[in-house]
Structures are given as structure tokens and as C-alpha cells.
């Protein structure tokens, strides 16, 4: 399961997007959230990774 955030961050002249992914822990079965700030072009690729 993955969730895309709508927020986009403006830093000087670079455009960055913050993406949040829900990851299920194999040990406990609980879900955790992994956050990352990256260029908008890389969001879909990052979300597709497991």
C-alpha cells in the first residue's frame, strides 16, 4: 500500500516533493510510514519499490 502526498516543497530554484509510503513490518505485522523528499520525476519509481 502506498500513499502519495499532495505537498510540494519549494527550495530555492529546485522543485521537490515529499512522498509518504506505508510499509508493513514482516516481524510484527504493524504498518510504519516511510517519508522521503525527492524530485517529482522519481516519486512513482520510489513508490513502486518494495
Image (cartoon, grey):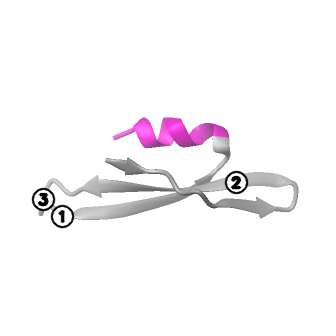
**Looking at the picture, does residue 20 appear above or below residue 45?**
below
Q: Identify the disc placed on residue 27.
A: 3
Q: Identify the disc placed on residue 16.
A: 2
Dot in front, 3 or 2: 2
Image quarter of residue 28: bottom left
Q: In the image, is 37 to the left or to the right of 49?
A: right
Q: In the image, is 8 to the left or to the right of 21?
A: right
Q: In the image, what residue occupies the spot 49% across and 51% down?
A: 4
**Looking at the picture, does residue 46 appear above or below residue 14?**
above
Residue under circle 1?
30
Q: Residue furthest right?
A: 13
Image quarter hosting the C terminus: top left
**First along the sequence among labels 3 and 2:** 2
Q: Position of residue 11 (x, y in %)?
A: 80, 62
Q: Identify the disc placed on residue 18.
A: none
**First along the sequence among labels 1 and 2:** 2
Q: Secondary structure at mark 1?
A: loop
Q: Secondary structure at mark 2?
A: strand
The residue carrying pointer 2 sits among few (fewer than 14), some (14 to 19) or many (20 or more) residues within 10 Å by Cα, namely some
Q: In the image, what residue occupies the spot 81% across and 52% down?
A: 14
Residue 16 is one of the magenta-drawn residues: no
Determine the CA span between mark 1 and mark 2. 29 Å
Q: Are marks 1 and 2 in contact (CB under 8 Å)?
A: no
Q: In the image, is 28 to the left or to the right of 40?
A: left
Q: In the image, is 24 to the left or to the right of 29?
A: right
Determine the CA span between mark 3 and mark 2. 33 Å
Q: In the image, what residue occupies the spot 53% across and 57% down?
A: 5
Q: Which residues are magenta?
A: 41-50
Q: Residue furthest front?
A: 6
Q: Position of residue 2 (x, y in %)?
A: 38, 48
Q: Position of residue 30 (x, y in %)?
A: 18, 64
Q: Position of residue 25 (x, y in %)?
A: 20, 57
Amino acid at each position: 500500500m502506498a500513499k502519495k502526498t499532495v505537498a510540494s516543497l519549494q527550495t530555492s530554484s529546485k522543485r521537490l516533493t515529499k512522498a509518504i509510503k506505508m510499509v508493513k513490518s514482516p516481524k510484527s505485522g504493524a504498518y510504519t510510514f516511510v517519508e522521503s523528499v525527492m524530485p517529482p520525476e522519481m516519486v512513482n519509481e520510489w513508490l513502486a519499490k518494495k
